[in-house]
């Protein structure tokens, strides 16, 4: 994957691009995305992948003009236009799934295919989602991964998660990224999306790790009900980071939705 820049009305946007085939736009979750992301590698085998970074992620500029859900939704449509794309396959994970669903609701005639991977955006009082902003670094692997030990090793590149060097770098990066993500996720990831999902016309596939402890699989059923005609694919032995733990199975499910 190659890191590039495209101009939009508010801010230059950094994005990853690679692969051959039909256009696919991938919207990352609150943890961001890098060129080493295993799902991007899998998707690039069958699609021309574009993965724009939300401002404030990676080495991208921050953007004060993006204040809320509507601003961010329209911003991503600006990115699609700037990339010269028409009706790409739109895929979003977690926070990115929430944004992708908003894009499909706000411009239902501009999108025909939508894939949502463990998306945020709905709220069930009987199944509250943990406060991402209150979770301590060493607690994150439990919520994000089916195999918490393997997830911890992956997140810390093999060092201890209480290592001062790791914590310093992690907290600095996290503060910058979650400062942007917090505009739509804090204090809870609920911005009235449930009232707009009836507008979605795109053929929709919902993908969920059956061991997700951050956004439990009961939400998968809520999404299937809210988006009429949505298909649901459950991925075994995977947590919220199903995109990492079972990248091949997720890519296969996406290929089936294309």
Image (cartoon, grey):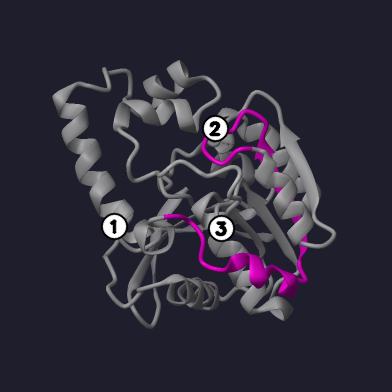
Confirm whether the magenta stretch covers residue 11: no
Closer to us: 28 or 119: 119
The answer to whether the residues at label 3 and label 1 have Cβ atoms under 8 Å apart is no
At mark 3, the secondary structure is loop
Total tally of numbered discs in the picture: 3
Residue denoted by label 2: 213
Q: Report the span colored magenta.
A: 188-216
Question: What residue would you read off at disc 1?
Answer: 179
**x and y, in percent, of residue 168 in the image:** 16, 35
Disc number lying in front (3 or 1): 3
Residue 213 within the magenta-colored segment of the rendering: yes
Residue sitting at 48 percent across and 76 percent down?
Answer: 70
Task: Identify the residue position indicated by label 3 in the image.
Answer: 121
Q: On screen, 29 above or below 86?
A: above
Q: In this view of the protein, can residue 181 be seen by the observer? A: yes
Residue 20, which numbered label?
Answer: none
């Amino acid at each position: 994957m190659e890191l590039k820049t495209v101009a939009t009305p508010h801010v230059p946007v950094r994005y990853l691009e690679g692969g051959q085939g039909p256009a696919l736009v991938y919207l990352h979750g609150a943890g961001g995305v890098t060129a080493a992301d295993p799902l991007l590698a899998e998707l690039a085998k069958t699609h021309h992948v574009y993965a724009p970074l939300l401002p404030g992620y990676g080495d991208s500029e921050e953007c004060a003009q993006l204040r809320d859900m509507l601003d961010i939704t329209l911003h991503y449509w600006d990115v699609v236009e700037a990339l010269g794309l028409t009706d790409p396959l739109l895929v979003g994970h977690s926070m990115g799934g929430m944004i992708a669903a908003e894009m499909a609701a706000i411009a239902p005639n501009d999108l025909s295919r939508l894939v949502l991977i463990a998306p945020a955006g709905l709220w069930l009082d009987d199944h509250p989602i943990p406060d991402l902003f209150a979770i301590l670094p060493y607690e994150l692997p439990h919520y994000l991964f089916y195999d918490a030990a393997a997830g911890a090793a992956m997140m810390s590149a093999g060092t201890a998660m209480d290592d001062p060097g790791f914590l310093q770098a992690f907290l600095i990066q996290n503060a910058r990224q979650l400062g942007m993500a917090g505009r739509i996720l804090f204090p809870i990831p609920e911005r009235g999306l449930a009232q707009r999902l009836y507008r979605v016309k795109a053929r929709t596939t919902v993908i969920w790790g059956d061991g997700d402890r951050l956004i439990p699989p009961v939400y998968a059923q809520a999404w299937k009900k809210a988006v009429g005609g949505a298909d649901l694919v459950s991925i075994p032995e995977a947590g919220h980071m199903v995109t990492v733990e079972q990248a091949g199975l997720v890519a296969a499910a996406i290929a089936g939705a294309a």
